[in-house]
């Protein structure tokens, strides 16, 4: 059956099923021309703003448009660098917050968004965060993701997370009191465990979701790498379903020099064994994990390999995502070029501004291989290929 006919036949069914079909055809990569026809049909015949935008967004991407009528599907805001902790590896805080006018524009995009991600500083510390969270929670099609140090999670927030199936990423870089409190300066290990326990208790009896609700981010450093074999057991015991192992970024020079594990063969050797244990326990205990960096010189598989059928196409990120950083600059995603600042322009102006259009145009013309950095192409930190 032709893709258009199949899309027509499916158009009366659950829209999420239709989206899976579209994504399947897209990933296969052999029928992008016919897919464009189907997307046009689906867009013209949809009445719901959210789905209409998704169909149009993918169509504009497939057509190589750089000036978009569609809105971003994925939104990320680093709301502020204000925090109640003073972690060893953190950057210097300036107290900067995203201007309210930019946040109003951000929330105006919620009717179109599939995914909204909130980062701080510490988001639960911010007075305006509950309003923003509740505004996104009104849209059932939005998956919210929150990164938090977990120290301020109380009953109110735990209930909100559960009621709205929010993916909560706890930053926990130690599974013993000594290591955790040495790194996460100002936090109490007992307090963290009590907050995890609270969520675990409130979730009891609820069905498990298809994606994790509670995640843990563990930044691998010189002062904590020996705890890696214990991480999966810790996660299981405290209701954490997924662990992201991250490498340290150079936000704080002094701590980076002291804590960075790159290019130390003894650490590499230890990590190979430690992650063997992680793999074993992950299967046994049902806690998933991703190592977001190359281990022992082994590459994780390039960006293009991970995309399989999509490999002949440019990275979709600048068509689908937008991130406002704490310093007000805007980019599509974490390793992309900056394309503006909400201190100077509105988000709408930036989304279709000259810099963003040039960025898209460059990707269409040269592909990511010739436009983007190795951290993204080798998936050594953020992994843009993990989005559907
Ligand atoms: S919790 Fe995050 S933002 Fe706060 S001090 Fe620690 S690393 Fe920095
Ligand atoms: S490959 Fe990475 S840096 Fe390049 S556009 Fe995609 S997300 Fe941005």
Image (cartoon, grey):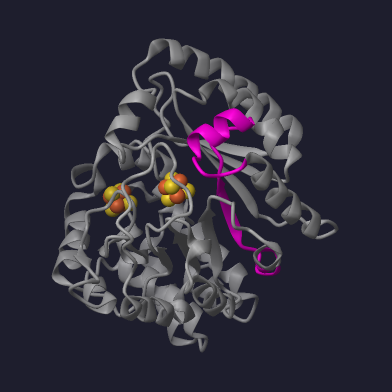
Q: How many marks?
A: 0
Residue at left 33%, top 45%? Answer: 91
Which residue is nearer to you in this view: 367 or 220? 220
Q: Is residue 10 above or below residue 198?
A: below
State yes or no: residue 173 in magenta: yes
Q: Is residue 10 left or right of residue 63?
A: right
Q: Residue 230 location, x and y as percent? A: 65, 26
- Residue 67: give x, y in percent of width and height: 22, 74
Give left or right: position of 158 versus 310: right
377 sits to left or right of 235: left
- Asked whether the viewer can see residue 314, the reply is no
Name above or below for residue 8 compared with residue 118.
Answer: below
Q: Which residues are magenta?
A: 160-188
In this rendering, the answer to whether 293 lies above or below 201 is above
**357 and 288: which is toward the camera:** 288
Residue 277 visible in the picture: yes
Magenta stretch encompasses residue 111:
no
What quarter of the picture does the N terminus occupy? Answer: bottom right
């Amino acid at each position: 059956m032709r893709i258009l006919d199949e899309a027509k036949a499916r158009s009366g069914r659950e829209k999420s099923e239709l989206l899976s079909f579209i994504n399947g055809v897209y990933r296969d990569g052999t029928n992008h021309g016919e897919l464009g026809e189907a997307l046009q049909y689906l867009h013209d015949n949809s009445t719901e703003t959210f789905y209409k935008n998704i169909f149009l967004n993918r169509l504009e991407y497939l057509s190589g448009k750089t000036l978009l009528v569609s809105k971003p599907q994925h939104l990320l805001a680093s709301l502020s660098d204000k925090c109640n902790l003073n972690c060893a590896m953190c950057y210097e805080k300036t107290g900067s917050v995203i201007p309210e006018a930019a946040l109003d524009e951000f929330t105006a995009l919620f009717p179109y968004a599939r995914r909204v991600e909130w980062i701080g500083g510490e988001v639960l510390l911010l007075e305006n965060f509950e309003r923003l969270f509740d505004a996104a929670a009104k849209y059932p099609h939005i998956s919210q993701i929150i990164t938090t140090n977990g120290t301020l999670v109380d009953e109110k927030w735990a209930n909100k997370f559960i009621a709205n199936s929010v993916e909560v990423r706890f930053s926990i870089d130690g599974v013993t009191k000594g290591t955790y409190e040495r790194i996460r300066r100002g936090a109490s290990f007992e307090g963290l465990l009590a907050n995890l326990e609270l969520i675990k208790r409130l979730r009891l009896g609820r069905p498990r979701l298809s994606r994790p609700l509670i995640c843990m981010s563990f930044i691998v450093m010189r002062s904590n790498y020996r705890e890696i074999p214990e991480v999966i057991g810790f996660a299981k015991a405290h209701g954490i379903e997924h662990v992201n192992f991250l490498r340290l970024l150079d936000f704080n020079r002094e701590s980076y020099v002291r804590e960075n594990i790159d290019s130390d063969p003894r650490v590499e050797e230890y990590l190979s064994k430690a992650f063997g244990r992680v793999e074993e326990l992950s299967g046994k205990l049902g806690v998933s994990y991703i190592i977001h960096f190359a281990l022992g010189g082994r590459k994780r598989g390039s960006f293009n390999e991970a995309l399989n059928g999509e490999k002949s196409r440019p990275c979709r990120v600048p068509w689908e995502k937008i991130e406002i950083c704490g310093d007000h600059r805007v980019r599509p995603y974490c390793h992309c070029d900056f394309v503006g600042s909400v201190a100077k322009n509105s988000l709408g102006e930036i989304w279709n501004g000259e810099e963003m259009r040039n960025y898209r145009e460059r990707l269409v013309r040269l592909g990511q291989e010739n436009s983007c950095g190795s951290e993204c192409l080798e998936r050594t930190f953020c992994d843009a290929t993990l989005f559907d």
